[in-house]
Amino acid sequence: MVFWVSVALLLYTQIGYAVLLALAARAVRAPAPAPPSGATPTVSLIIAAYNEGAVIAAKVANALALDWPRERLEIIVCSDGADDDTVERARAAGADLVLDLPRAGKLRTQDAGVAAAHGELLAFSDANSIWEPDALAALVAAFDDPAVAYACGQVRFVQAAEGPQADNQEGLYWRYEMAVRANESRLCSVTAGNGAIYAVRRERYLIIDERMDHDLCFPFMLVKRGWRAVDVPQARASEKMVPSIGGEFARKRRMNSHIWTMVLRSGLLVPRGYGLRYGWMILSHRLLRYAAPALHVVALATNVALVGHGTIYVICLAAQLGLVLAASAGARIRSRPLSLARYYVLMNAALAAGLWDHLRRGTPPGWEVPEGTR
């Protein structure tokens, strides 16, 4: 029973949830879209930056080129103790305000930007994220609905390099993730966002633990307070991703240390305020996803114990070992299926490694620029 339950939960969280969610979202009658209000609220675009001298000028230029009235847009670059020329380049590029702050981590840096901002809406972006010209207008339009407190756009990850080491499959994962989030938004609210492109009402901005992040905490925290957190597919951005799967593992390991801080300390596990639909989404898309490494270990251990109890267990064990072998082969053989297997295994391993790091030494608030993404 333990074996089959663990296998069923793995299949459900990786495949079944997306299928059921798509069916549920299709069954919901979407309200007729409201006509655009034509309102142009003031927006403060806050860009937290740590040693982003290589890209910050291009980011400011990208922000200045957005289809939004210039007098209604405030561009704020917040340097988190950068020791390169980030501050000088941001000022020269035309940012309205550049804060040269002591090193404190991304969250406290963003908080400082919010404290200095004047906009009715607060938009956030990474220094290496390039927004399409109409992205901000699409993001702002979501706030025509007075129930919406948080809106995130969709990010497309592009390969930063070519060659045998450029095997990261993060782009494929994010296409799957964006489809899931679009259906969550249609049915209720998203369970997570992304740091490349999102916005929040100024009066709904939350000060959270410096070891967490907005991407994962703002949606469910705001839903608990009675607001909606929505996905805006028309608001599009692009980012370079880490070239190799090995590099992606290192990045996700650092990120997942922050995820476990959020899981254990943010109230995510407390169902009060969710509602039935959203509670189902949190369980399926967040909690079971984070439990996948443990479920894999349980499935493999119980499968080994059951291998003498029927042909089906031999087949299941062969399938599990085949996945591990394919992932191992993906390090040496350039093949899309093998790279996908390697990506899946290593990203689950990164979840477990992030938990180990969190339990062993805690989660520092600092952050680093992933290699190859600038």
Image (cartoon, rainbow, N blue to C red):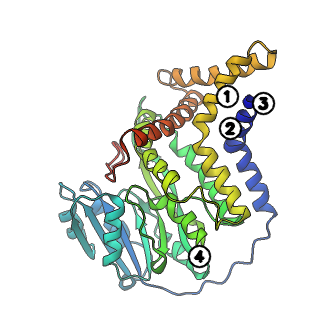
- In the rendered view, would you say 144 is above or below 86? below
Q: Amino acid at mark 2?
A: Leu
Dot 1 or dot 4, earlier in sequence: 4
Q: Are marks 3 and 2 in contact (CB under 8 Å)?
A: no
Q: Are marks 1 and 2 in contact (CB under 8 Å)?
A: yes
> Horizontally, is 235 left or right of 57 in the view?
right
* Mark pair 1, 2: CA separation: 9 Å
Q: Position of residue 331 (x, y in %)?
A: 47, 24
- Residue at which label 1 appears: 299
* Mark pair 1, 3: CA separation: 10 Å
Q: Amino acid at mark 4?
A: Val
Dot 1 or dot 2, earlier in sequence: 2
Q: Residue at x 42, y 35 (%)?
A: 244
> On residue 1, which mark appears?
3
> Horizontally, is 56 left or right of 37 in the view?
left
Where disc 3 sits, the SS reads loop
> On residue 10, which mark appears?
2
Q: Residue at x 61, y 49 (%)?
A: 287
- Residue at which label 4 appears: 148
* Mark pair 3, 4: CA separation: 43 Å
Label 3 or label 4, whichever lies nearer to me, is 3
Q: Are marks 1 and 4 in contact (CB under 8 Å)?
A: no
> On residue 358, which mark appears?
none
* Mark pair 3, 2: CA separation: 14 Å
Label 1 or label 3, whichever lies nearer to me, is 3
Q: Mark 1, residues whose alpha carbon is within 10 Å: few (<14), some, or many (≥20)?
A: many
Q: Amino acid at mark 3?
A: Met
- Which quarter of the image is occupied by the N terminus? top right
- In the rendered view, would you say 137 is above or below 48? below
